[in-house]
Image (tube, rainbow, N blue to C red):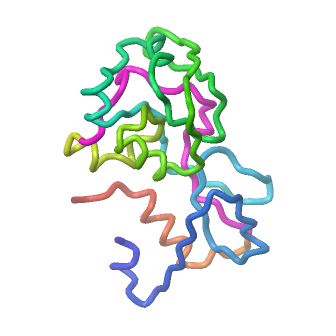
Amino acid sequence: MRYLALYPKTQVELMLTNRMVDLIAEGVDLAIRAGGPSTSNLVVKPFRETPACLWASRAYGNERGLPQAPEELAEHEFIRPQSLPPKLWLKSKTRRVEVTLRSRLAVDDLEASKAFVLRGAGIGLFPPLICEDEQAVGDLISVLSGWTVDFRPESQRLAFVYPPQRFVPPRVRRFIELGTQPETP
């Protein structure tokens, strides 16, 4: 929103997809991707860490209770990201534990996963940055708050990705600059 406010003559076409877009073939100026680069012929500029945490709705917690230790997760329904296996490693400051998750529903989209969690379908896994509003009003609560999923470090990183070029267009440079600055209230 800041970008559009600062540059009112600029037009943005936003594509939201889980498909790996071929930036060069499809004429895309800039992508935001999680994890490492898919190919080595792109410029990758990491800008934010995104740890994955466990979340449940208040209704789910009231009805089923919430696990107090990672080993208790096997007793709960889990909304599994489609790309993840049913076993995960969780880490705290002092321990690392492998857990097997019971999941009847696998979802390939974070917002869809969040919607199922909000409806009380189970415990979900997503970065805190996509549920700040729901957490602030108490609709979503952190599960095992001292624990995070132990992924490879690069898979927890958001990065700007764009095709290599001699001169990066000013509109792309400015978007990246704004995206790497802290937001002011």
Is residue 143 a member of the stretch shown in magenta?
yes
Residue at the image point whose x is 36% and y is 26% from the top? 143
Residue at the image point whose x is 61% and y is 62% from the top? 17
Between 39 and 182, the one lying in front of the other is 39
> Residue 97's spot in the image, x, y percent?
54, 12
- Does residue 156 lie above or below 159 as drawn? above
Residue at the image point whose x is 64% and y is 73% from the top? 29
> Residue 158's spot in the image, x, y percent?
54, 49
- Does residue 44 lie above or below 2 as drawn? above
- Does residue 60 lie above or below 157 as drawn? above
Name the quadrant containing residue 92: top left
Check the picture and name the quadrant holding the C terminus.
bottom left
Between 129 and 168, the one lying in front of the other is 129
* 22 with respect to 135 (left or right): right
Residue at the image point whose x is 76% and y is 72% from the top? 24
Between 102 and 130, the one lying in front of the other is 102
Q: Which residues are magenta?
A: 139-164
* 160 with respect to 178 (left or right): right
Between 159 and 13, the one lying in front of the other is 13
> Residue 30's spot in the image, x, y percent?
61, 68
- Does residue 153 lie above or below 161 as drawn? above
> Residue 127's spot in the image, x, y percent?
44, 41
- The residue positioned farthest toward the bottom in the image shown: 9
Name the quadrant containing residue 32: bottom right
Is residue 58 a member of the stretch shown in magenta?
no
Name the quadrant containing residue 54: top left
